[in-house]
């Protein structure tokens, strides 16, 4: 006798219910759909961290140090050269005077070339200004990063010379900088936190909407086209339960997607923090702290975004005549959902406050506030209530459409 599968053994051990039967069937169908599982697991856990960090990885001078060709025509400039050599984020190689430095950069032998003129130290010792010459490629990211590093070393070296000159003259250093600028922010937000506030809600929103799109299309229009939906309709079960069962099946996938999405975002932001510190050479700007309560808020509202998107897609796909038509609707809707998310990254708080009552975008705004640890309880509750209200209306619409023979079997 053939041994029952793991799925069969799990199911037979669970309490019996018509609604649970439908949910279990939908979930097993989803597990067999490679596109659905890729959107649910692969995209959030792999592509989100990669999308966040590939640019930063390529920009990081620690991971990809710019290659600098050093043409030192002034043997007396050893202190500046030693300071430059002490920077581990750049790879310095000496070159001879007979080489064409422009060709070396243009042909990518070096990302940039630094020339220390013969009279560099002489001019500085005479109380004048010594000039450094840099040849770089503005289309090469590593080249521009190298220029920033050279500028950093130049600034440190110049500050040291100015300090020595002022000391020799017995002059207070403040004389060369008589006006100071003191900047105070109403909120303390690190650069990494600012980045997370822009990008994380965007990625969570996209994944939350896309995760159930493929399966929502297949479980409605797909079953309609394959004629398997008719078997459902002949069963002694109400159409309300069928719709709820299908929606809960998609919801299970959404929960899995949100879990992997949050894991992917956590990995991505963690890697980004370290890469950002490498790129800016300022570790203090890379801190990201979100309170546990705000992490819960992010997870709950990510799930609400996913549930709302799933309900909209299910209603539209029930209305579609065929699987192909449902795919077209689904593609248009997901594009319509995700495009405005780009704008949310750049909108000021005064405008974002008006989005609280808008489905999908209201919860994304709340997630943004949670990342900045500025969640307001009244806004959170209002958004939660309105979002659940929208969800109830959408499910009611899906049930009405599914209950209409004219819609369900239209050709």
Image (spheres, helix red, strand yellow):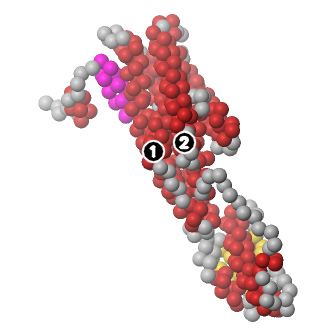
**Residue occupying image coordinates x 66% and y 55%:** 185
Along the horizontal axis of the image, is 228 left or right of 377? left
In this rendering, the answer to whether 131 lies above or below 292 is: below
Residue 2 is tagged as none
Badge count: 2
Residue highlighted by disc 2: 375
Q: Quadrant of residue 203?
A: top right
**Label 1 Cα neighbours within 10 Å, binned few <14 / some 14-19 / many ≥20:** few
Residue 127 in the image, given as x and y percentages of width and height = 85, 89
First of labels 1, 2 by sequence position: 1
Element type at marker 2? loop
Q: Quadrant of residue 355?
A: top right
Residue 24: in magenta span:
yes
> Which span is picked out in magenta?
18-32
Q: Nearer the viewer, residue 10 or 302?
A: 302
**Residue occupying image coordinates x 54% and y 26%:** 386
Judge whether residue 193 can be spotted in this image. yes
**Residue occupying image coordinates x 74% and y 61%:** 139
Q: Nearer the viewer, residue 112 or 250?
A: 250
């Amino acid at each position: 006798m053939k041994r029952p599968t793991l799925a069969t053994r799990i199911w037979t051990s669970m309490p019996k219910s018509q609604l649970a039967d439908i949910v279990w069937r939908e979930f097993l169908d989803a597990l067999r759909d490679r596109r659905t599982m890729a959107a649910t697991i692969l995209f959030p856990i792999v592509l989100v961290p990669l999308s966040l960090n590939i640019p930063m990885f390529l920009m990081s001078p620690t991971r990809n140090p710019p290659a600098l060709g050093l043409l030192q025509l002034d043997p007396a400039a050893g202190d500046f050269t030693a300071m430059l050599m002490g920077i581990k984020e750049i790879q310095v190689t000496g070159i001879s005077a007979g080489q064409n430095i422009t060709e070396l950069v243009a042909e990518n032998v070096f990302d940039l070339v630094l020339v220390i003129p013969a009279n560099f130290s002489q001019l500085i010792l005479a109380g004048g200004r010594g000039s450094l010459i840099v040849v770089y490629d503005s289309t090469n990211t590593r080249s521009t990063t190298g220029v920033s590093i050279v500028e950093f070393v130049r600034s440190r070296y110049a500050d040291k010379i100015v300090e020595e000159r002022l000391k020799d003259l017995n002059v207070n250093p403040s004389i060369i900088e008589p006006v100071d600028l003191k900047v105070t922010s109403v909120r303390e937000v690190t650069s990494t936190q600012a980045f997370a506030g822009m990008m994380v809600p965007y990625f969570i929103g996209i994944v939350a909407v896309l995760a159930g799109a493929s399966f929502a299309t297949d479980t409605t229009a797909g079953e309609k086209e394959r004629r398997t939906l008719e078997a459902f309709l002949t069963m002694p079960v109400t159409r309300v339960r069928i719709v709820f069962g299908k929606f809960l099946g998609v919801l299970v996938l959404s929960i899995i997607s949100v879990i992997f999405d949050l894991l992917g975002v956590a990995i991505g932001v963690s890697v980004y923090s370290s890469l950002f510190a490498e790129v800016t050479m300022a570790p203090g700007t890379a801190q990201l702290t979100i309170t546990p309560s705000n992490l819960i808020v992010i997870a709950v509202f990510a799930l609400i975004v996913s549930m709302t998107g799933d309900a909209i897609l299910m209603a539209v796909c029930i209305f579609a005549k065929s699987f192909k038509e449902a795919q077209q609707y689904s593609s248009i809707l997901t594009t319509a959902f995700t495009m405005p998310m780009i704008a949310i990254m750049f909108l000021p708080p005064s405008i974002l406050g008006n989005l609280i009552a808008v489905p999908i975008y209201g919860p994304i705004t709340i997630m943004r506030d949670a990342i900045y640890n500025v969640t307001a309880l009244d806004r959170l509750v209002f958004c939660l209530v309105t979002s659940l209200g929208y969800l109830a209306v959408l499910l009611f619409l899906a049930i009405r459409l599914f209950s209409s023979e004219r819609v369900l079997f239209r050709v």
